[in-house]
Image: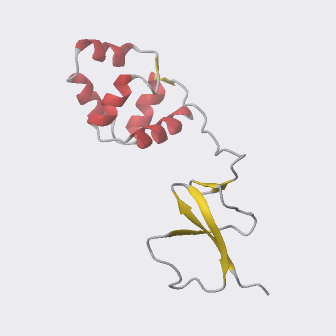
Amino acid sequence: MDTKVTKARIENSLVVEVLALENWDDVFSPELVWVQVPTDQNVKCGWLYDGTFHSPTTPPPVPEPLRPLSARQIRLALAAAGLLDQVEMTIAGLPQASRIEWQYASSYERTHPLIASIGTAVNLSDGQIDDMWRQAEAL
């Protein structure tokens, strides 16, 4: 029975070395990044790593683009996250054009500058906004 564990050394999201050893304890400097290779993958130098391994000919999957949200969807998502009141107070302090944009838009684009401004005002990162947006798409 083979008890070797295969790991890949990663530098700048790129596999630069692949080794199979029986004992990995204190073998290399802790500054080196070694990631265990799944047994069903034949990872080689030159592969990409972004949390999962990808051959250089298979690019990482591209997420689906974020669709526009209706006024109902965006407000329900904010309410579910406990942020609707805070967003409404933030909107009240914005210039009139922004208040009109928020109040009367029939749909909202994720890339609209107002969305980024609101996110910043309520301390949401771009990733958190994207996650909430995806959840709102299902409402």
Q: Position of residue 113 (x, y in %)?
A: 36, 23
Q: Residue at coordinates 46% horizontally, 15% vertically from top-left? A: 106
Whether residue 125 is visible:
yes
Image vertical order of residue 5 relative to residue 114, above or below: below
Relative side of 25 to 52, left or right: left
Residue 67: name its quadrant.
top right
Identify which residue, 122 or 34, lies in the foreground.
Answer: 34
State the quadrant of the C terminus. Answer: top right
- Residue farthest toward the left in the current orientation of the protein: 93
Relative side of 2 to 136, left or right: right
Identify which residue, 46 or 102, lies in the foreground.
Answer: 46
State the quadrant of the N terminus. Answer: bottom right
Image vertical order of residue 22 relative to residue 113, above or below: below
Residue 88: name its quadrant.
top left
Q: Where is residue 84 in the image (x, y as percent from the top left)?
A: 33, 34
Relative side of 92 to 111, left or right: left
Identify which residue, 47 or 82, lies in the foreground.
Answer: 47
Whether residue 51 is visible:
no
